[in-house]
Image (cartoon, helix red, strand yellow):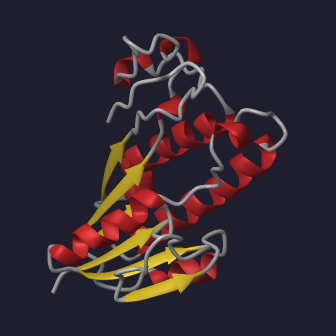
Amino acid sequence: MKKAVVLGAGGFIGSHMVKRLKKEGFEVVGVDLKKPEFSDSKADLFVVGDLRDPELVAKVIGSNVDELYQFAADMGGAGFIFTGENDADIMHNSALINLNVTYECVKKNVKRVFYSSSACMYPEHNQLDPDNPNCTENSAYPAAPDSEYGWEKLFIEIISSEPIFTGPVKFDLINFIVASIHSSIYKKERV
């Protein structure tokens, strides 16, 4: 049986990924600061814990992990990330999580890693027209993310795309473009 680890498994996207992986026949370990709010987790093992702790990350990313899905982040929605009051915590906490995860994935040779980035890593001016957002990879540079959350996502994208850091581990980077980017401006959901 293939084994998957889902980080951020207590959130909306992570909890649904656990369900999908179970339907596909995976043994699933879910990890988050909290369990899902609206349903029981379908994970074979659910660990409530803080991924900023490197010992916890080493424990939950065991040997023989086929796939790891990284959704965990210090993210509280636009009202949290765009105030300016939480910038240092957002960058510190999310960077610790992602550096711990990247280190363990490489150390344990996880076969495939899915890293969920964010449209926040694209320049803000590219996101202002809800009918024509310019969130393509070639629009990411020159770098000008719309928030510190976006800067941290861009930093980890760089780390996880460089073989010098990742060795043979395959990292798939996906940016989510959803309605919460600029909720007051962005009316359409795009995935």
Q: Residue at x 45, y 54 (%)?
A: 165
Quarter of the image for residue 14 reads: bottom left
Instruction: Judge from the rendering whether residue 105 lies leftward or rightward of residue 50; answer left or right.
Output: left
Establish if 165 lies above or below 52. Answer: above
Residue found at x 80% / y 44%: 86
- The one of 40 and 108 positioned closer to us in this rendering: 40
- Tell me residue 31's x, y (percent): 49, 76
Give the vertical position of 95 relative to 16 (above or below).
above
Quarter of the image with the N terminus is: bottom left
Question: Is residue 162 visible from the viewing direction of this image?
Answer: no
Q: Is residue 57 above or below residue 168?
A: below
Locate residue 93: give its quadrant: bottom right
Q: For residue 88, say whether it is visible.
A: yes
Residue situated furthest right in the rendering: 85
Above/below status of 43 relative to 70: below
Task: Find residue 68 and report its horizontal and vertical position in percent.
Answer: 35, 67
Residue 91 percent location from the top left of the image: 70, 47
The residue positioned 33% from the left and 60% from the top of the image is 113
Residue placed most toward the observer, 53 or 6: 6
Where residue 40 sits, quadrant-wise, is bottom left
Q: Residue at x 45, y 44 (%)?
A: 117
Please give left or right for residue 54 compared with residue 167 in the image: right
Q: How many marks?
A: 0
Q: Residue 82 at what x, y percent from top left?
A: 72, 33
Q: Which is more toward the observer, 109 or 95? A: 95
